[in-house]
Amino acid sequence: MSKIFAHRGCSGTYPENTMIAFRKAVELGVDGIEFDVHLTKDNELVIIHDESIDRTSNGSGLVRNMTLAELRQYDYSAKFAGVYGHNDIPTLREYFELVKDTPIISNIELKTGIHEYPGIEQAVIDMVKAYHLEDRVILSSFNHYTIMRCKAIDPTLKCGFLSESWLVDYGKYTASHGVECCHPVLFNLIPSVVEEMHAAGCEINTYTVNEEADILRLAALGVDGLIGNYPERMIKLLR
Ligand code: G3P
Ligand code: MG
C-alpha cells in the first residue's frame, strides 16, 4: 500500500510549510510529512519553500540574509492571508516538537539548489539525533552532493535523490551511491521506470500527487510513497 505524505503539510487547504498545515496532517493520520528547510543568517533551520520570503509572506528578502528574529516579523499565511490568523515561519525544532511522539515519517527536503548553505547537512542531522528521530526521517534534495554529504555524516540515515528529469537508470544511479530512495516527479513514473527503480532495490516516493487519476494510477503501479497537497483526498481514495 502506498504511503501518504502531506506535501509542505496540508498545503492545499492551509498555508504551506506552517505549523497549522503540519498539525492538520498529524490530525488526518498521514504516514508522512514533506517540508523544505533553509538556513538563516544566524544559523537557524527554518521551514519554507523558497530562498526568499516574498511569495509566502508579507515581507521581502532572502532567508539567508535575515536572522530568525527578523524573519519572525512577518506573516507566512501566503494565499490564506487573514483566513487562519498569523502564521510564523516554523523552525525545524518546533516541527520536531510536534511529531516527536507520533509515528509520522518526516521527509526533510534540504533546499540547497541555489544557495548551498554550508553546514546545513550537519545541522539537520544533529537536530534529527537530538530528537531521536533517526528511524523516522528521509533526507532528500535536488542537490545530490548534499545527499552525499549527509551519507558521509551518517550512512544509516535514509536518503532520497530528487529529480524532475527523465534520468536513465535512475534506480541504478541511486543505489550505486548508497542512497535508498528515488524521489521523481510523478510524470516520469511509467511502468518501466517504476520497475527499474524497484529492481535496483530503491523505494520510490513521488511528488506532487494531487489529482484523483494520478493518485489511483500511481498507487496501482505500486509506488511506495505519494507526496501531495491534499492528503485527505489520498486517504479517501486509498484507505
Ligand atoms: O520533495 C518533493 C517536492 O517537494 C519537491 O519539489 O519544489 O515542491 O519542493 P518542491
Ligand atoms: Mg519540497
Image (cartoon, grey):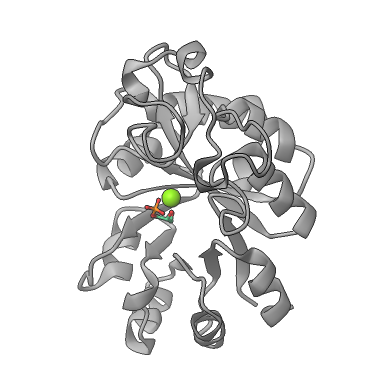
Task: Assign the N terminus to one quadrant of the image.
Answer: bottom right
Question: In the picture, residue 169 is in which quadrant?
Answer: bottom left
Residue drawn at x 35%, y 61% is 175
The reply to whether residue 47 is visible in this rendering is: yes
Residue 64: % across, % down: 33, 21
- Farthest-out residue, front: 82
Residue drawn at x 34%, y 32% is 52
Foreground residue among 161 and 16 = 16
Foreground residue among 161 and 94 = 94
Foreground residue among 75 and 188 = 75
Residue 97: % across, % down: 71, 30
Question: In the picture, residue 51 is in which quadrant?
Answer: top left
Residue 12: % across, % down: 57, 59
Foreground residue among 118 and 72 = 72
Query: In the displayed structure, would residue 220 be above or below residue 184?
Result: below
Residue drawn at x 53%, y 34% is 76
Residue 19 shown left or right of residue 12 in the figure: right
Query: In the displayed structure, would residue 28 be above or below residue 142?
Result: below
Task: Assign the C terminus to one quadrant of the image.
Answer: bottom right
Residue 122: % across, % down: 42, 25
The reply to whether residue 204 is visible in this rendering is: no
**Count of marks overlaid on the render:** 0
Residue drawn at x 62%, y 68% is 3
